[in-house]
Amino acid sequence: MVQATWISAERALHPVPEGYRHFLYHQILTVVTITDRRTERSNTIDKTRRPVEQQVAAMGSELFEVGLYNPNAGMGESVMIPRVWDAETVAKSVSWLRHQNREGRNIYIRPKGEHDLSMIDDLNADAVSAMRENGFHPALIVETSPGNYQAWLKHHERLSKDESTAAARALAEKFGGDRGAADWRHFGRLSGFTNRKAQYLDARTGLYPFVRLIEATGSVYSEAERFLAGVKGDLERRQAEREHVRSRHLARANLIRRQDLKTIDVFRADGRYGGDGTRVDLAYAVYALSHGAGAEQVETAIRSRDLSHKGNERRQDDYVERTIKKALAAIDRGR
């Protein structure tokens, strides 16, 4: 290209003095060189953009959280630069992401909000093969460092946070992934950029390995419905067990409180009430009900004294009911 340009320029400029012709030649050569560099840079960006576009398409989320992480950020710099982008904006930001990557930041991505994906981290090639062979074919496979992989599985439905975390942990246990990285919103690496962890720096070349896109089908794995049914069943059982333990604990605590309650006789013997049975009944009802006693227990205690002076049985029932209602109202006012 340079030679052809020079020949054409030489013929056109033949009448021009020799020194000026050389000046123009160097100017032409400079323009060609700059153009070649720009073309090379554009091609490099395109090589990064393609796997980025393929990865976000396979993940299939409406919005993504992109994280630019540098644990060695200097004074006044953020360790994590977060962004929320759609797929188009992620692709358009490749040039800026490449710059940040060269400056030492690792580039991560995850779906924003609840989603239909599970990311399994720290897998070897055998684990990825086992996933494929057993009906858990990943929608996305990314090689994060030589021989180390992250696999994203796409479920047939969007999961709640609890379901998503439970599914990720079950998958990590099933295929030997990192259980510590298994939750509903863990970051994965974005392909096309370098893994800037110090342990992966090549001492000979001074270069970091690229995060490579291995596969990006975006497909739901065949075992999705069966697997998720089991995950949801296990989650429901664990939640029921926790609720049962909680109920037993509360019942035991209430029983202990009821056993430690003062009796109504303690209130009747208290001189502050001057032997006034109505004041005693109300004071006891407030105390007992606020300490976990039931209305029936309070009613039994009040009726342990002779209430015939209140009138017939219906009037006695009304008195007991009014006393308990007053006690409950007093407790509510005090909360």
Image (spheres, grey):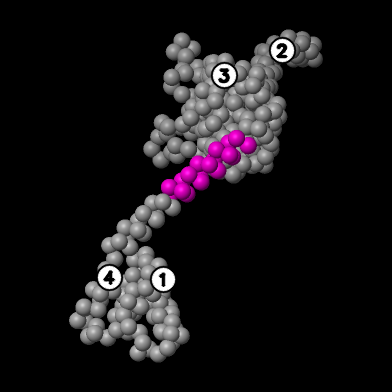
Q: Is residue 218 left or right of residue 210?
A: right
At horizontal 49% and vertical 27% (from top left) the residue drawn is: 178
Q: Is residue 237 above or below residue 330?
A: above
Q: Is residue 249 left or right of residue 171?
A: left
Q: Which residue is mark 4?
A: 263
Comparing 1 with 233, the one in front is 233
- The first of marks 3 and 2 along the sequence is 2
Badges 1 and 4: C-beta atoms under 8 Å apart? no
Does residue 99 appear anywhere in the picture?
A: no
Which residues make up the magenta segment?
229-246
Q: Which residue is mark 1?
A: 295
* Residue 323 location (% of width, % of height): 39, 80
Q: Which residue is mark 2?
A: 2
Mark 4, Cα crowd under 10 Å, few <14 / some 14-19 / many 20+, is some
- The first of marks 2 and 1 along the sequence is 2
At horizontal 39% and vertical 56% (from top left) the residue drawn is: 251
* Kind of residue sitting beneath label 3: Ala
At horizontal 69% and vertical 31% (from top left) the residue drawn is: 220
- Closer to the observer: label 4 or label 3? 4
